[in-house]
Image: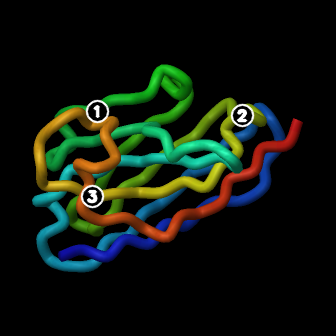
């Protein structure tokens, strides 16, 4: 079992950057592939980024590709989301999630554990 805690959200102007962090408990963090999802007000939670257990593979939603970068440090039990050139439409609560299962990386129900989320607000 793993517990996830996100941090690093905040208010930023359009064009700015933020770096989100997700700290994981437990000694088996490297056993989990990790995803970042986001949920804007009144919308469903959507996939943003994915990183495999050994960081050898990453995947991004089309809306963030080229602007967001996901990384992880298994020695520190952490995963990160560097967000550059932020837009007002990136405003959302951002969640990290962990999974051991296979399947489409954008599918929410393939992830076993979720953090509580961190708010990102981008002003125009």
Residue 14 position in % (x across, y down): 80, 35
The CA span between labels 3 and 1 is 14 Å
In front of the other: 49 or 113: 113
Query: Are there few (<14), some (14-19), or many (20+) residues within 10 Å of tag 1?
Result: some
Number of numbered labels in the structure image: 3
Image height of 76 relative to 122, above or below = below
Residue behind mark 1: 58
Image height of 71 relative to 26, above or below = above
Residue behind mark 2: 89
Residue 6 position in % (x across, y down): 49, 66
From the viewer's perspective, tell me whether residue 92 is left or right of residue 123: left
State which tag comes first along the sequence, 3 or 1: 1
The structure residue drawn at horizontal position 63% and vertical position 48%, both measured from the top left corner, is 18
Q: Nearer the viewer, mark 1 or mark 2?
A: 2
Residue 100 position in % (x across, y down): 13, 55
State which tag comes first along the sequence, 2 or 3: 2
Q: In which quadrant is the N terminus drawn? A: bottom left
Q: Are marks 1 and 2 in contact (CB under 8 Å)?
A: no
The structure residue drawn at horizontal position 31% and vertical position 40%, both measured from the top left corner, is 107
Q: Nearer the viewer, mark 3 or mark 1?
A: 3
The structure residue drawn at horizontal position 40% and vertical position 38%, both measured from the top left corner, is 49
From the viewer's perspective, tell me whether residue 101 is left or right of residue 107: left
Instruction: Tell me the SS state at disc 1.
Output: strand
Instruction: Tell me the SS state at disc 2.
Output: helix
Query: Are there few (<14), some (14-19), or many (20+) residues within 10 Å of tag 2?
Result: few
The CA span between labels 2 and 3 is 25 Å
The CA span between labels 1 and 2 is 22 Å
Residue behind mark 3: 98
Image height of 33 relative to 15, above or below = below
Q: Are marks 2 and 3 in contact (CB under 8 Å)?
A: no
């Amino acid at each position: 079992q793993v517990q996830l805690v996100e941090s690093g959200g905040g208010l930023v102007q359009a064009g700015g950057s933020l770096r989100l962090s997700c700290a994981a408990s437990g000694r088996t963090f490297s056993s989990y592939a990790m995803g970042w999802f986001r949920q804007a007000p009144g919308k469903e939670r959507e996939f943003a980024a994915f990183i495999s257990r050994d960081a050898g593979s990453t995947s991004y939603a089309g809306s963030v590709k080229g602007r967001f970068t996901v990384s992880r440090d298994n020695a520190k039990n952490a995963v990160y989301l560097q967000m550059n050139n932020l837009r007002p439409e990136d405003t959302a609560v951002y969640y990290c999630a962990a999974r051991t299962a296979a399947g489409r990386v954008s599918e929410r129900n393939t992830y076993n554990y979720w953090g509580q989320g961190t708010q990102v607000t981008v002003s125009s």
